[in-house]
Image (cartoon, helix red, strand yellow):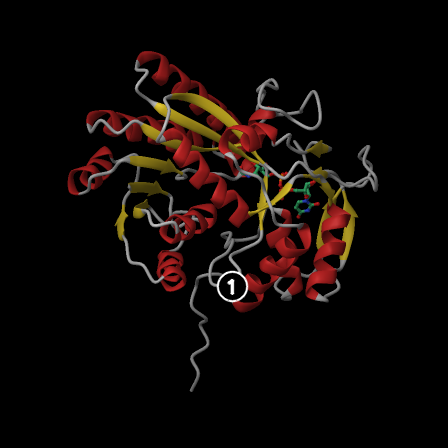
Amino acid sequence: MVVLITGGAGYIGSHTCVELLQAGYEIIVLDNYRNSHPESLKRVEQITGRGFKVYRGDLLDEKSIEKVFIENNIEAVIHFAGLKAVGESVQIPLMYYECNINGTIKLCNVMKKYNVKNLVFSSSATVYGVPERIPISEDAALEAQSPYGRTKQMIEEILRDLYVSDQEWSIALLRYFNPIGAHESGLIGEAPNGIPNNLMPYITQVAIGKLKVLNIFGNKYPTKDGTGVRDYIHVVDLAKGHLKALEKVSSATGVEAYNLGTGKGYSVLEIVEAFEKAANIKIPYRIVEPRKGDIAICYADPSKARRELGWTAEKEIEEMCMDSWRWQSRNPNGYVEDSIVLQ
Ligand code: WQD
């Protein structure tokens, strides 16, 4: 099967490309490299020993999407491409609505034109907002609290309406919890632009000395040690969830949402402790004010994905920390080739 991966050069996209290639799929990648680096795709080829076509293009340019469909017999799409920083989305909401929503609409228009109606969409646990119940199940209320989260929530609604208009569509909405870790090779991983927003890349940059100290956003939450609790999931487990979702959309029509999480919550301090043990490095930290928009506790009820996709996260927090550390220590500048030229 030939699968188009939009945003395939990104953190979760590149890990999913590895799993798809190793499972025997033929893949085509479309990416604009706004939040990613072409080097990640060279590393995907290095890991798998398999080549694949790459198109540089933006989903807002419908012609660049159509070129991919004209030149290849696409049978399904995994759609990662989009902007994904919560804080940034508050500053530039129109950019987020245009890129994420218009980009998805243009993609679906081209898919429809070429009669490709199998879609796996990269959604997010942020669609739940402040959860009523923990663990969170897929039937919980959707109340995203940021423009970024609202783009994901609106796109889910758009895709449900698309199915109502044409029941040949088959769509999986994958709600990610907190992806961390990296492929065991240390060749691909999370490479945020600038100062990391997320916890694990911030910790690993403190560990390599790029950042001085970890700021822990508040320790007065109603949790075991007062710091925020999240459902951290290994990015390779997340990638494998996409293969299961692809199998599902290739075999049945309809629209279904799935939580991709472990069902376990860890606090910030527990993550720091697990990382220190895995990397054998002390992480200096200070407690600062809570971050605006943060919630206290968030972790998944992943039973629907287990029941309907036959998928369960397998990797434990120690492996997530070790793999994050291996990637960062071997790639201190992410995918940018080291500027130091050996004489
Ligand atoms: C985790 C915990 C922070 C950084 C975000 C997005 C979500 C998804 C995953 C896209 C929280 C604490 C963090 C730091 C800290 N991305 N923290 N110091 O906010 O749960 O989710 O990333 O889909 O959409 O919202 O992840 O890693 O930012 O924070 O104390 O420097 O670590 O308060 O408790 P979050 P995070």
Ligand 1 picture quarter: top right
Which residue is more in the foreground, 118 or 295?
118
Q: Residue 306, position in %: x, y?
A: 56, 33
Relative height, residue 124 to residue 24 (above, below): above
Residue receiving disc 1: 186
Residue sitting farthest toward the top? 165
The residue under the point 73% across, 55% down is 274
In the image: residue 6, left or right of residue 71: right
Which residue is more in the foreground, 152 or 48?
48
Residue 50, image quadrant: bottom left
Q: Residues within 10 Å of mark 1 (few under 14, many from 20)?
A: some
Q: Amino acid at mark 1?
A: Gly
SS category of the residue bearing label 1: loop
Can you say which quadrant of the picture contains the C terminus? bottom left
The residue under the point 59% across, 57% down is 324
Q: Residue 136, position in %: x, y?
A: 65, 26
Relative height, residue 228 to residue 185 (above, below): above
Can you say which quadrant of the picture contains the N terminus? top left
Which residue is more in the foreground, 2 or 270?
2
Q: Residue 172, position in %: x, y?
A: 43, 28
In the image: residue 222, left or right of residue 231: right
In the image: residue 76, left or right of residue 270: left
